[in-house]
Amino acid sequence: METSKIIFYLLGGFILGMALMAVTEKKIFRAAIWLLFTLIGVAGLYFWMSLEFIAAVQIIVYVGGIVVLIIFSVFLTHQAEEDMPKTNIVRKLAAGLSVLLGAAFTIRLFLTNDFSLSPVEFDSEVSRIGEAMLQTGPGGFLLPFEAVSMLLLAAMVGCIVIAIRPDKPDKAEKENNDPLTDRREKNLLNTENNYS
Amino acid sequence: MNYLQEILVISTALFFIGIYGLLTRRNIIAILMSVELMLNSVNINFVAFNKYLFPNSLDGIFFTIFIITIAAAEEAIAIAIVINLYRNHNSVDIESTTLLKF
């Protein structure tokens, strides 16, 4: 057996093992760490396919961004050492059975299908990706690129709007009744009138 | 069995592991983690199809890049919602969040 094949099987086993640990672990913080190892394994699979750019994006965005976000939210909302609530055994069995059947069906589908691999070698030059990303016309991805940048901006604003702590109503009232602020506002109005 | 089919076996297994987590977990953050697993398996599929079947085009690569970007945005929004929910309910268990239940 060739070396690359052995590395591929090791990577596959690593990914699946870590993913299984991530969905069956009882403590949520440990599950997040198993998820982190799964994502690193997927990045390794991209490296194995010699797609260095996608692997780098995977490590930067998933491992560096999303997992850190998840860990932050775990720390904000949980006692990290407590066990998660248990699911009953019937639901677990049903889920496992349906998952096994679905996986067997899908895998059988594409094992019987004949994929004719292309004889041309894939050119994984990064400049190819960069040029296509900023090109209009056929084969160019400028419009989705811009649309995704707008989406990121909208997501940023949305996060702030959703997660911001609203002012307590009694506090806001107090501020309105505060004589000091009243006076300041009157002064402001006066100066504005003077200017106009 | 060629390389493409072996990669597809791995990504299918990853996808169904994600579905298992989605069906059995009761914690919102754990469900989000399962969704991330499923998104990752889809990315592997796109990249493998692009590399082994259509080496002259870049569509699969770009789909993967955009999926990763949108997954990051989705995760940030979801975590903002989870934090807001925790502030109102003091819990992130899906069985106890029945605010929208009619």
Image: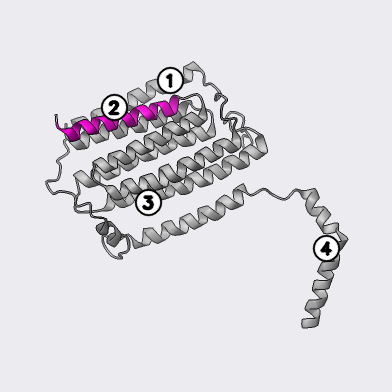
The residue most toward the left is A119
The chain under label 1 reads A
- Measured as percent of width and height from the top left, residue A146 is found at 40, 61
Residue displayed at 57% across by 45% down: B80
Asked if residue A106 shows in the view, the reply is no
- Using the numbered discs, state the Cα–Cα distance from disc 4 to disc 2 in whole angstroms: 70 Å
Q: Name the foreground residue: B17 vs A65.
A: A65
Residue that mark 3 sits on: B66
- Using the numbered discs, state the Cα–Cα distance from disc 1 to disc 3 in whole angstroms: 34 Å
Residue that mark 1 sits on: A94
Location of residue A187 (image quadrant): bottom right
For the residue labelled by badge 3, is the local secondary structure a helix, a strand or a loop?
Answer: helix
Mark 3 surroundings within 10 Å by alpha-carbon count, few (fewer than 14), some (14 through 19), many (20 or more): some
Which circle, 2 or 3, is nearer the viewer? Answer: 3
Tags 4 and 2 touching, CB below 8 Å: no
The segment highlighted magenta reads: A2-24
Asked whether, in this view, residue B15 is left or right of residue B58, the answer is right
Asked if residue B84 shows in the view, the reply is yes
- Measured as percent of width and height from the top left, residue B53 is found at 19, 45
The type of residue carrying mark 3 is: Phe
- Using the numbered discs, state the Cα–Cα distance from disc 1 to disc 4 in whole angstroms: 63 Å
